[in-house]
Amino acid sequence: AIAAFRQLLGAFPEHVTAPSATYHLARALVEGKRHDEAIALLRPFPERYRDSKLVPDARYLLGVASLGAGHASDGLAEMRAFVSAYPGHELANQARRTIVDRLVKEGHKDDLAQEYKTLMAQSPRTAEGVYDAGFIASRLGRPRDAESAWAILRKDFPDHPLAVRASFDLAQSAFGRGNFKDAATLARGAVKSDDEAVRAQAQLLLGESELKLKR
């Protein structure tokens, strides 16, 4: 695949398929752990193919490639820039999780705790900010703070896609505490998600909760 995409781009660099070929070449390079080669393709992508629908995906992949290459600061900066520019993108949740998990892994818990406070104190609040605050709290081992943030999200932004995601996260917490009735109720709400992955996980959790309730 890498050889074929390189051949296409070498022979027809201005062809209409060049943006797609460049993105998929970079993706294949990332999958092959050739991160620096992928970075060289992805860094100029937003400027070179500014009208391409793949610009958001390429910016996310640049963050992945940078982290994979060991450039933690650059990778996290790229991930943050991606989330800021495309908060509703289908990969935004994964980017947020990657950022928080990386900071936890590197021991930046104090920074995360401060970010939680900052997000919860935002005025006006945003659905993305409140969801991120809940996710940070969950990774810091503060389930009550996480549940509080996600409850606010569901109350203040009931129609936002992240509210449905929050329902699933709350359902998981309830299931982990053995509160299967609440887990079933929350999972039933998360089944309405437009995100296929969330919907599938919610259906599984709903089934497991009902089994625990002997229904």
Image: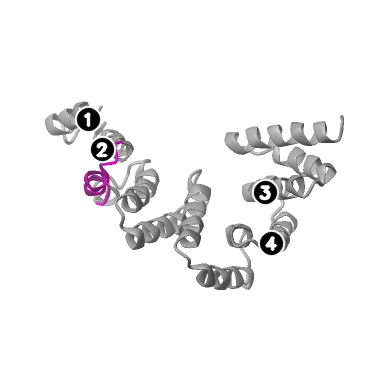
Reply yes or no: does residue 169 show up in magenta. Answer: no
Disc 4 residue type (three-letter): Ala
Which quadrant holds residue 130? bottom right
Secondary structure under badge 4?
A: helix
Residue 138 vertical position relative to residue 112 in the rendered view, above or below: above
Mark 4 neighbour density, 10 Å: few (under 14) some (14–19) many (20 or more): many
Bounds of the magenta segment: 32-43
Q: CA distance from mark 3 to mark 4?
A: 11 Å
Under mark 3, the amino acid is Asp
Q: Give the residue at mark 3.
A: 169
Instruction: Say if mark 1 contacts mark 4, CB within 8 Å.
Output: no
Q: Which of the two discs, 1 and 3, labels the residue nearer the N terminus?
A: 1
Characterize the local packing of mark 2: few (<14), some (14-19) or many (20 or more) Cα atoms within 10 angstroms: many
Is mark 1 in CB contact (under 8 Å) with mark 2?
yes
Find disc 2 in the rendering and name its residue: 22
Quadrant, the C terminus: top right
The quarter of the displayed image where residue 140 is located: bottom right
